[in-house]
Amino acid sequence: MRVDLLTKEYPPEIYGGAGVHVAELVRALRTDIDVVVRCFGAPREDADTHSYIVPSQLAEANPTLATLGVDLQMAQDVAGADVVHSHTWYANAAGHLAKLLHGVPHVVTAHSLEPLRPWKAEQLGGGYRVSSWVEKTAFEAADAVIAVSDGMRRDILRSYPALDPSRVQVVYNGIDLERWKPTRDDDLVRALGIDPNRPSVVFVGRITRQKGLPYLLRAASLLRDDVQLVLCAGAPDTPGIMAEVTAGVEALQRERSGVVWIDRLLPQHELSAVLTAGTVFVCPSVYEPLGIVNLEAMACGLPVVGTATGGIPEVVAEGETGRLVPIEQLDDGTGTPTDPDVFVRDLARILTEVLDDPAGAAEMGAAGRRRAEREFSWGQIARRTQEIYATLL
């Protein structure tokens, strides 16, 4: 069996959870089947990996049109595959066109949904309507749709009611348990500006509306003075959200010490060390299909405090591997809390409860590692994915 996997992100050009998912899935699948990767960006040296750049005529076009220029090239080259598997709307058009052009089954993995990310219009302008059209068309015509959580499956069927529910299967994201593990390196974290002897709350994520970073900055002002806030946050969606976060961080730094902002992508070893040095990991997202960062934190032995939304409750077992922050959200697709002040206070309260019980936090962290080992290995996920491929042949 030859599967052509289509993606925007692929090592070394990774900036989000979808890219991590694709890289790990490909590595696991290649132990059993032939996988040809077709990705965006600069040439790669890996075997059976082909990269594509935006056609020069579209270099200054709206990003969605530039994306379609790459997708057309991918679709042409898929000839000969048994299955085509696309990830995110960036590659969905390539998968859909390949299905039509070559008569090959198309599998889509849903990492997020355009109808639930209306703030993307800030970044794409009218291109958001194009990306939404691409996603809807590809999903409704796909032979199989993979959701990364039960919560995501519900969101897919609510967003695309014309989709046959029998074609939507759940296969969780996973974690490489050999790479992600407790990694104590006090000298390294000190070099990053972190005091390993102070309690700390760690956030890892892109600077985008869905990650809820402005709410975390407000909640952090309510924490004990000795608590550090470590923000591994970069890759802003827009200048607007970057300006908002920058202002929030600077205001927090004026009122308390120990606010550390690392705005570059850390190598995996360094990030593991930062997580291991932490007391609690926080995921204040208002939209999160699953959250690979939560699995990474759990694998490093850190308890997770996450918003009770999307797929987060399927990863974070309340009171066992972490805590869930209740949230009531607007039904306009933005995920905005109906009462932001209540959400901020609840976030600060639950973080404080975990920080005030370091022994209990350590126990939840150890339980999180065990849960990651039991339920989120990439070997299991690759096998389930291959089972879906086999049903289409």
Image (tube, helix red, strand yellow):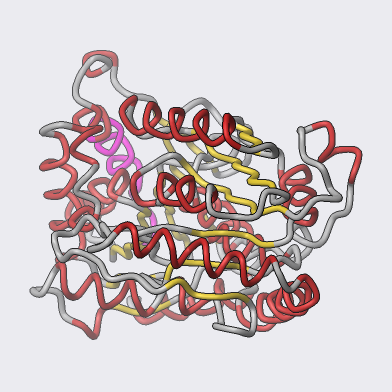
Q: Is residue 37 magenta?
A: no
Relative to 349, does residue 391 appear above or below in the rendering?
below
Look at the image and tell me in which quarter the C terminus lies: bottom left
* In-image side of 161 versus 369 (left or right): left
Could you tell me residue 369's position as x and y percent?
A: 73, 74
Residue at 79% across, 62% down: 181
* In-image side of 367 versus 263 (left or right): right
The reply to whether residue 84 is in sight is: no
Residue at 37% across, 63% down: 343
- Residues shaded magenta: 68-84
Residue at 21% across, 83% down: 165
Could you tell me residue 391's position as x and y percent?
A: 36, 82
Residue at 10% across, 74% down: 161
Relative to 114, does residue 329 appear above or below in the rendering?
below
Quick one: 341 or 55, which is closer to the camera? Answer: 341
Number of on-image labels: 0
The reply to whether residue 304 is in sight is: yes
Relative to 257, does residue 318 appear above or below in the rendering?
below
Q: Is residue 78 magenta?
A: yes
Location of residue 247 by image quarter: top left
* In-image side of 208 versus 45 (left or right): left
Could you tell me residue 167's position as x and y percent?
A: 25, 79
Quick one: 210 or 179, which is closer to the camera? Answer: 210
Quick one: 305 or 98, which is closer to the camera? Answer: 305
Quick one: 169 or 106, which is closer to the camera? Answer: 169
Relative to 268, does residue 162 appear above or below in the rendering?
below
